[in-house]
Amino acid sequence: MSQSRCRYYILYIDDFSRQSWVFFLRSKTSAEICAVFREFNTMTELKLSTRISPFGCNNQKGEYDIEEFRSILKESGISFEPAPPYTQHENGVAERMIQTHNAKARAMILDSQLPWSLRAEAINTANYLHAQSPTSANKGVTPSEKLYGSKPTISHLCRFGCKAYRMLPAAQRHGKFASRAETVYMLGYVHDSTSIWRLWNTERQGVIQASNVRFDELVMTATHVESMISDPFEIAKLNTDRSRQVDAHTETSKQADANSPRPTDPSLLAADNVRLNTGRYNLQKRPRAVGHRTWVEEESDSADPVSYQNAVRHPRLGPKWSGAIRDISKKMES
C-alpha cells in the first residue's frame, strides 16, 4: 500500500505519441474506475482538444466489464475494443509499459533507500520521465514532443531520492538564529510545471510541494557502498571484484599496446621518438615521486654539481656546464 493508501493504478496510453497517464486506485470497484475514466476523458477533451476513439483494454472479462462503464463509453461516442481472453499480447503496448514503469520505480526505490510506501511516487516519476525520454516507437522523438509539438524542458530533472533543502519562509522560522531550511528528499515533479517538485518530509512523514529548493545530487561512490555493507565477507567480495576488474583492465591495455601497429616510415619513427623523449627528463622509466624529487634537486640553481658526470647530464644546465668546462680546458692548455 502506498503513502496515499492506493493499492492499484490504471495506465492510459496514447497510441499516436506513446504518452501515458497514471491514475492511482484504492480499490477496483466500478464506481472508482468509472470516476477515474471520467476524469481522464474530461482532461483529454479540455486540454488536448480531442476525443478518445477507440478504447482498448486487456480483456473482455476484466475491470471494464461492467454496465456502468459501457454506458459511459456510449454516451461519449467511444467504441469499445477489448482484447480476447488469455491474449495479453494483443494489448502488448500497455503490458510492456506497465512492466517498464514497475522496473523503473523498483530501481529508484532501491537506489534511494526510501520506504516502500512511496512506490506510488516512484511510479508517477517513472511515468513523467517516460514522457521526456526518446522512444523508438516515435523514431527518437519524445512522447511529449510528438503530442504537444514542442521539445520538453529537462533542466529541472533531479535524481530521485536525493537530499534537498527547502527554504523556509519567514513565518515558519523559529527565531532569527534558527535554521532557514529543512531537509527533504526529492520524489517527483508536478505536471505542467518545471519549478515545483514533490518532496518527502521525514519529520512530518508526508509529501509536500515546494519551489524554493536546493538539491544535493551526490553520486554514490564505492566508499558509500562499503559503508552500507555490514557483512565483512561482502566487503571482501567487493574488493576482490574490484581487483579483478583492475587486472582485467591492465591485461587488456597490455594486449592493446602489443597489438597496436608501429609506424614503418622513418620520419614517423623519428617523430615518435621525439614525442616519447620530449621533456626535461623522461618519467616513463621511473616512478612519478622519484621524478618529482629529481626535478626539485636539479632545478635548484644554487646547488653546484659534485662531479663531471652530474654537470654534463644536468637536464637543463648540462650544455652550459659542458661549454664552461671546455673553455676552462682551453685556457689551461694555452
Image: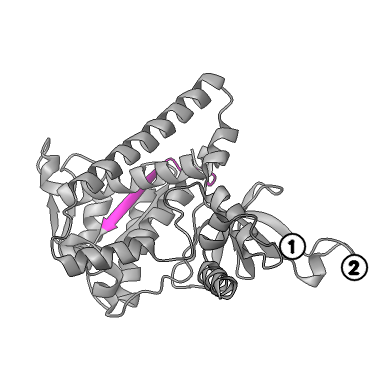
Quadrant of residue 294 within the rendered picture? bottom right
For the residues labelled 1 and 2, say whether their Cβ atoms are less than 8 Å apart.
Answer: no
Image spot of residue 30 (x, y percent): 33, 46
Q: Position of residue 43 (x, y in %)?
A: 35, 69
Q: Is the residue marked by circle 1 packed among few (<14), some (14-19), or many (20+) residues within 10 Å?
A: some
Which residue is outermost to the top? 233
Q: Which mark is residue 176?
A: 2
Asked if one can make out residue 283 in the rendered structure from this viewpoint, the answer is yes
Identify whether 326 is placed above or below 221: below
Q: Position of residue 40 (x, y in %)?
A: 34, 63
Disc 1 target residue: 181
Q: Left or right? Give the position of 158 relative to 15.
A: right
Q: Residues within 10 Å of mark 2 (few under 14, many from 20)?
A: few
Between disc 1 and disc 2, whose residue precedes?
Answer: 2
**Magenta stretch, residue numbers:** 3-12
Between 324 and 313, the one lying in front of the other is 324
What amino acid does circle 1 point to?
Answer: Ala
Residue 26 shown left or right of residue 226 in the figure: left
> In the visual, does 140 lie left or right of 306?
left
At 67% from the left and 64% from the top, the residue drawn is 300
- Distance, label 1 to label 2, CA atoms, is 13 Å
